Amino acid sequence: MSEEKLIYDVVVGYMLKVIKSGTKITKFQKEFDAIKHGDYVCFINLIGAGIPNDIVVSKEGEIIPTEKQIEIKNADFVFLLLSSISLKNFYSKCYKEFGEIHDSELTNNDFENLANFEMVLRMFYNNIFITENRINLIDVINILLSDREVPTKEIEIVQKGREFLNMVKGHKAKFSSTEEGLIAFSKALDILEMHEITVTV
């Protein structure tokens, strides 16, 4: 989905591969849940590696000091950048724990696209709607795409992509094979790109 790999996609893609392999991720469950659900502040605090001091953030022409950037509201892309140190730190810990994992059905790029899929949808949703509680991805898709006046049939295609992501996460399979699910997921990505619901760097 992105023209250049985001560190987020690499890290969460790797964790999805770990999950699909059947390996337990209990040791890193809190960190994974925080970053997967877009709670960047929680994730940064859990890792404790700090934020980059070379990123310039401004609002209405005024430079926001590094120590105040973490307090910005409804700015998920900024938080994605601010979490880069924490993501690299987390990936190092995870790789040390789980090592190289080979999957015979999906490529690294497939896993990274799956990670990017959920992140992008949640990012677009969070930048429009303010919610105090965690919202399920099925609802994120319905609310966000309806708000953007995406046709119902296309929303259903994106929901099929979500179902494949859930299958990779170990939920009940809605497809007869990984290949079938991957085809449905590819169609979902096409819909998001058509409606410019993407993040590029």
Image (spheres, grey):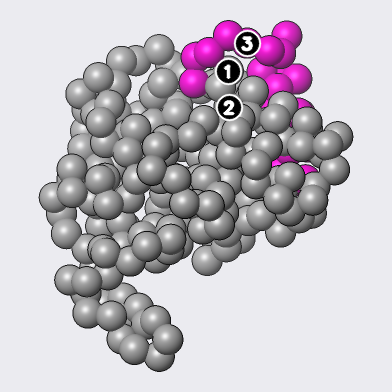
Query: In the figure, residue 155 lies in which quadrant?
Result: top right
Residue type at tag 2? Leu
Give yes or no for contact between labels 3 and 1 (Cβ–Cβ under 8 Å).
yes
Is label 2 in contact with label 3 (beta carbons under 8 Å)? no
**Badge number at residue 165:** 2
Question: Which is more N-terminal, label 1 or label 3?
Answer: 1
Q: Residue furthest bottom?
A: 61
Label 2 and label 3: CA atoms lie apart by: 10 Å
Q: Which residue is mark 1?
A: 167
Chain-order first, disc 2 or disc 3: 2
The answer to whether residue 45 is visible is yes
* Residue 123 seen by the camera: no
Q: Position of residue 154 (x, y in %)?
A: 82, 39
Q: Answer few, some or many: residues within 10 Å of disc 3's Cα (few below 14, many 20 plus, some between 14 and 19).
A: some
Q: CA distance from mark 1 to mark 2?
A: 5 Å
**Quadrant assignment, res 178:** top right
Q: Which residues are magenta?
A: 169-191
Name the residue: 71% across, 46% down.
Answer: 145
Q: Relative to 26, is 157 above or below? A: below
Disc number for residue 22: none
Q: Residue at x 80, y 47 (%)?
A: 150
Q: Which residue appears at 40% of the width and 12% of the height?
A: 22
